[in-house]
Amino acid sequence: MDWLALHLPALALEVYTRAFASDEASNAPSAEPPGKPSGGPRAAAPSPAGGRPPLAVSEHERIVARNAAAARLGILPGLPDGAARALVAELRILPRRPAAERAALARLAAWAMAFSDRVSLAPPAALVLESGRSLKLFGGAAALRRRVLDGVTGLGWRACCVLAPTPGAALVLAAAGLGAGGDTPAAARGSDGGGDDAGGAIIADRDALRRTLAALPVAALDFGAAELADLERMGIRRVTDLLRLPRAGLAERFGVARLTQLQRLLGERPDPRRPFVPPARFRATLELPAEVPDAAALVFACRRLIDELSGFLLARQAGVQHLDWRLHHAGGPPTRFRLGAAAPARESEHWLTLLRERLDRLSLPAPVRAIAVASEQLRPLAPTPIELFPRDAAATALDPALLDRLRARLGAAAVRGLTALPDHRPEHALRLCEPRLAPAERPDARGRSEPARPESKVARKRPRRSAREVIPAPGTATNTRRDRPLWLLAQPAPLAMRDGRPWLDGPLDLGTGCERIDTGWWDGFAVARDYYVALSAKGERLWVYRELRGNRGWFLHGIFGDDPVAT
């Protein structure tokens, strides 16, 4: 049980229908060869639009897949498009999208890397991953298969999942529908009873693998039409008949390549597979089978993409801080918007909450036909350390989820961060920036952020700076000086003078001491001031200054919001 194969029999249809908020796609008998019983489709769940219409996918003017509603009306794979329309007038026929199928299979392979680091594509509708090293981690073969199958189903795909000793055999058995459940002949099961409740979808050893393959028709081995006709004339209809033939005669009649294929299926020869290399960024597009005029109704379809993103990020042990969305319309440019997070994140529920906030307030210029999402460069996420004696820091820690929801609801420009700059002038000491939660960066002399450098051995021996000397991270609201207010007036307000003292609803108590700022002569914004922390008659703490040049007037520049002695 070293390889796990996933086969998507309805991939051509589900690139459209998995955007539906129902389980119809998983029940649709859309990809069986003609004549194969479908097992009877179940009733489809109603859609927000009020029921599933008959839907089919066509390639070269012939039906290749259809949903359950079309199957109930007699639409079969292989039927010409004209005959299908004549049979069902309300049938909607969509073109097959091979590029969308390949892209969906690649995204599923990237998602599957959360279960194994060795994943290989098997176009047009399958992939296989090495599972031998993952069995213990996920609790055994049955638990791994169930977890993978549940995850694939949650993404909107109907899949057949088989574990077998060889990758080729796992793919053949999955394509034959073995991992889709149902009954399996006893001869096809392993010595331990055939695995789990999947009806023999877990092949325990090579002896069980040989018996399982022997029960299949020879058409399951991907022979060509001429080769199948030749085998039919020889009376060979099942793989068990093929295995009885002498190997030398088989190679002479059908070529060495067919003999090599059979030996790889049985595990008699190595079967190397090209590993899948995941992309550096996540990009996905979801076609909608029908136009959606309401933005809020797109949440379920977008969730499919977000779940794929979450699995992709989990496999890469990474997160993203921004997602760019595009809603495509029948005419005109797409509707674009960006979702941002205060810190790199990969949890699907977090991104879905932000998306709901944005879609609830989004006005669409036209109905949506397709949804596309793209991430920025991935950022590695370090494992979160767990303290032996956890402390309750909820009262002081910033909530990133709250910050992200505020930005999604109010807009990015309405929720900003502050970065402290190395400048004594109050007007130049702070600058608006993207909000951040962790002090991972610090500003340089021009206000640009640079990564914090690791401490040297000498620096680690020195005593650490006090809290008053710590340089805050860009985007944090931490003030570096306790005698400066965070609330500054847009323009300093002049103060009246009475009896030689500044006056604001009464005389101001200037206390003792001041902060002198005399700088800025080099950039055209020279400042020469003496700043005082003043106390008004009402008990307000104000930040006032007196000019050292010119008319030497008094001005109110800021208001304190707390008492530094009390805090």
Image: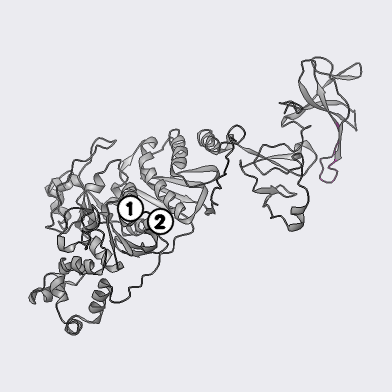
- Kindly identify the residue that appears in the image at 69 percent across and 37 percent down: 478
Judged left or right of residue 298, residue 280 is: right
Is 527 colored magenta in this rendering?
yes
Q: Residues within 10 Å of mark 1 (few under 14, many from 20)?
A: some
Residue 272 location, x and y as percent?
A: 35, 73
Residue 64, visible in the rendered structure: yes
Q: Do the residues bearing badges 1 and 2 touch, measured as CB atoms within 8 Å?
A: no
Residue 329: in sight, yes or no?
Answer: no
Is 279 rendered above or below residue 559? below
Q: Residue at x 12, y 75 (%)?
A: 231
Residue of label 2: 137
Question: At which x and y percent is residue 67?
Answer: 21, 48
Tell me the tag on residue 143: 1
Whichever of labels 1 and 2 marks the residue nearer the N terminus, that label is 2
In the figure, 462 relative to 188: above or below? above
Q: Amino acid at mark 2?
A: Leu
Q: Nearer the viewer, residue 66 or 274?
A: 274
Q: In this picture, which residue range is highlighted in magenta?
A: 519-530
Q: Nearer the viewer, residue 185 or 398?
A: 185
Query: Camera-side residue: 142 or 419?
Result: 142
Q: Mark 2: few, some, or many residues within 10 Å (few <14, many ≥20)?
A: few
Quadrant of the image containing the C terminus: top right
Q: Is disc 2 placed on a helix, strand or loop?
A: loop
Left or right: 108, with 30 as reference point: right
Gap between marks 1 and 2 measured at Cα: 10 Å
Q: Pick the residue in front: 470 or 225.
A: 470
Residue 75 position, x and y percent, is 14, 50
Is 484 left, or right, of 153 in this rendering? Answer: right
